[in-house]
Structures are given as structure tokens and as C-alpha cells.
Image (cartoon, helix red, strand yellow):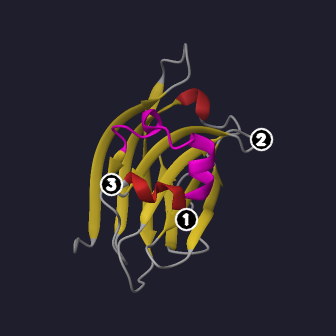
């Protein structure tokens, strides 16, 4: 994939039982330039204690490689129900993955964190490369990853 920006408009409601209010949240993950294949990227939520709660998106279509997204894989159990309908192509070096998802209002400012795991074939895997609280104060503030992610932001 040679596109500089990969735009995936999505509507996925991430809701707990009895929650009906949601808002669109845009997640932007810019990868640094690197040599090698496209990156597999897992975006997911954990609660305040760090316990896995919900998959937001998996970039990379071959599920046999999901085990390299180690923190996500452990939390989700890699059960297809955790990622069905929430996958797309891997993300190429130096490109940007943009997602817009519906997120339950009750998850915002409630101690939840957005995590990103990344992996590239024959290169280093990065567990919880990015971890940011899902808060109104954090919206629009870029966070650098510790591996392939150059910058991550979310906005309402």
C-alpha cells in the first residue's frame, strides 16, 4: 500500500450494557518511516486497572500474526469475536491510519486507556507501544510511541 494517508471511516459502537449515548472519536496513528513490511497494529481499550476491555481496530488481515500483538492477544484471547468486523490492511511505513469510531460516552473520563501494540515481520514487536488515558483533556494531544508509532492522537 503506497498511500500516504489511509482513511477508514467506521462506525463501531463500543458500548457496555445499558449505555446508549456515544460520540464519534477520531483516532490518528502516524507511523515513522522504517524499512520492511507493513505493520500490524492493534488499538484497544483497558480499564483503569489495565485489564483488557475492548478491541477498537486491528490493522493486518492475517490472524496468524496477531499473536505478535502480545498485550492485545493476551487480553483478547485472540478470539475472532473480539476482532470480527474490526480489521483492515496493515499500515505501511511512514503512512497514517485514521479511524473514526463511535465510543460510548461512559468510557470517556472514566479511567479507560487506549493502547496500541505494533509488530512488523522480521522486526521488533512493541507491546503497549502507546498508552494514553481516554479523557477530554487528552484529546488532540499527540503522543509518541516507543517503536513504529511516530505520533498518536484522538479527538472528539
First in residue order: circle 3 vs circle 1? 3
The correct choice, above or below, for 19 with respect to 30 in the image is above
Farthest-out residue, right? 49
Q: Quadrant of the N terminus?
A: bottom left
Tell me if mark 2 has few (under 14), some (14-19) or many (20+) residues whose alpha carbon lies within 10 angstroms of its own: few
Provide residue 128's location: percent of width, then percent of height.
63, 60
Image point (74%, 40%), residue name: 48
Assess whether mark 1 and mark 3 are in contact (beta carbons under 8 angstroms). no
Depth order, front residue of 61/156: 61
Give the number of the mark in front: 3 or 2.
Answer: 3
Assess whether mark 2 and mark 3 are in contact (beta carbons under 8 angstroms). no
Residue 41 visible in the displayed image? yes
Marks 3 and 1 sit apart, C-alpha to C-alpha, by 27 Å
Provide residue 17's location: percent of width, then percent of height.
55, 16
Residue 144 occupies quadrant:
bottom right
Q: Which residues are magenta?
A: 69-86
Give the secondary structure at mark 3: loop
Image point (55%, 76%), residue name: 124
The correct choice, above or below, for 99 with respect to 46 in the image is below
- Tell whether 65 sits left or right of 88: right
Give the number of the mark in front: 3 or 1.
Answer: 3
Residue 103 magenta: no
| Count of labels in the image | 3
Judging by the rendered image, the residue that carries numbered circle 1 is 142
Give the secondary structure at mark 1: loop
Amino acid at each position: 500500500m503506497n498511500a500516504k494517508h489511509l482513511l477508514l471511516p467506521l462506525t463501531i459502537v463500543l458500548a457496555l450494557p445499558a449505555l446508549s449515548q456515544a460520540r464519534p472519536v477520531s483516532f490518528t496513528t502516524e507511523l515513522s518511516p522504517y524499512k520492511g513490511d507493513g505493520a500490524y497494529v492493534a488499538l484497544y481499550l483497558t480499564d483503569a486497572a489495565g485489564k483488557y476491555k475492548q478491541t477498537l481496530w486491528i490493522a493486518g488481515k492475517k490472524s496468524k500474526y496477531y499473536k505478535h500483538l502480545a498485550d492485545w492477544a493476551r487480553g483478547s484471547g485472540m478470539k475472532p469475536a473480539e476482532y470480527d468486523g474490526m480489521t483492515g490492511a496493515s499500515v505501511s511505513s511512514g503512512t497514517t491510519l485514521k479511524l473514526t469510531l463511535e465510543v460510548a460516552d461512559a468510557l470517556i473520563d472514566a479511567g479507560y486507556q487506549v493502547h496500541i501494540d505494533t509488530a512488523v515481520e522480521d522486526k521488533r514487536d512493541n507491546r503497549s507501544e502507546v498508552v494514553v488515558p481516554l479523557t477530554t483533556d487528552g484529546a488532540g494531544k499527540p503522543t509518541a510511541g516507543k517503536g513504529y508509532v511516530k505520533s498518536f492522537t484522538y479527538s472528539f
